[in-house]
Image (cartoon, grey):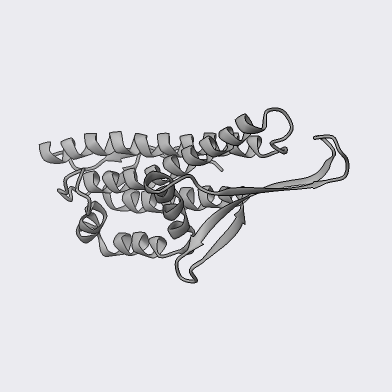
Amino acid sequence: MTIGEVSFDYLETTNTEEQSYKLWEGFHFDVRLKLNGADYFLRQLLGAISRPDRIGSPILAYHFRQWYLDAFFFELMASYEILIQELNAIYVCGVKAYDINIFSKVKQALPENLASLLEEERKKKWFKKLKWYRNSITHRNRNITNDFTLSWGDKPWHYSHYEVSLEYYNERTSNWDSENVKNLETYFTKMVDHIHSVWEKIKEQRFSNSD
């Protein structure tokens, strides 16, 4: 997935807006930094689960799996949360950066079409699950993973199929659901697409294209 490069010229030039632009510039860079971090850790994770843990050092292999998984969720969700800081700056919403209700307050100060875009995406299943995964490792415990190996011999390399699944607690059904860790590529793609769509709105409303 390509995160992309877009060049903008700032239109408004008053001192206050110039300060807002400088803030926006830093947050915009940080969103890209976090997306690149999520991309990196996802690649490392997919490499770590490409073969059974029992090939090599099982404990170390398991640790790498969990570390990369945690880092991916942290970086990907952070890209979104910093996006809200980016909007706070460029639309001069005036919300304090550490306000725990920053999303709801920033949303109220945004143009209606942009606020609706953000709200609709937050209601989608992929976003709710991503937020649950990140919150789980932050406030509760590690994300639970299980692996399945289809073996045909007594050697560690005697296998024809191997996959790792991630467990998710479905609050609606009060049951645990399972999904293949490789599905996390979809989460990354959806987040990148969503952030791009927000950037397009910013471009239309606050900038002129420099090309």
Quadrant of the image occupied by residue 8: top left
Quadrant of the image occupied by residue 154: top right
Q: Residue furthest right?
A: 153
Residue 203: x %, y % from top left: 34, 48
210 vs 190, left or right, is: left
The residue drawn where x is 82% and y is 42% is 159
| Above or below 105: residue 142 | above
- For the N terminus, which image quadrant? top right
- For the C terminus, which image quadrant? top left
Residue 124: x %, y % from top left: 45, 64
63 vs 134, left or right, is: right
**Nearest to the observer: residue 101 or residue 150:** 150
Residue 196: x %, y % from top left: 43, 49
Residue 177: x %, y % from top left: 57, 62
**Nearest to the observer: residue 55 or residue 4:** 55
Judge whether residue 100 can be spotted in this image: yes
209 vs 51, left or right, is: left
The residue drawn where x is 18% and y is 47% is 92
**Nearest to the observer: residue 72 or residue 188:** 72
Judge whether residue 4 can be spotted in this image: no
The residue drawn where x is 67% and y is 33% is 58
184 vs 103, left or right, is: right
Quadrant of the image occupied by residue 201: bottom left
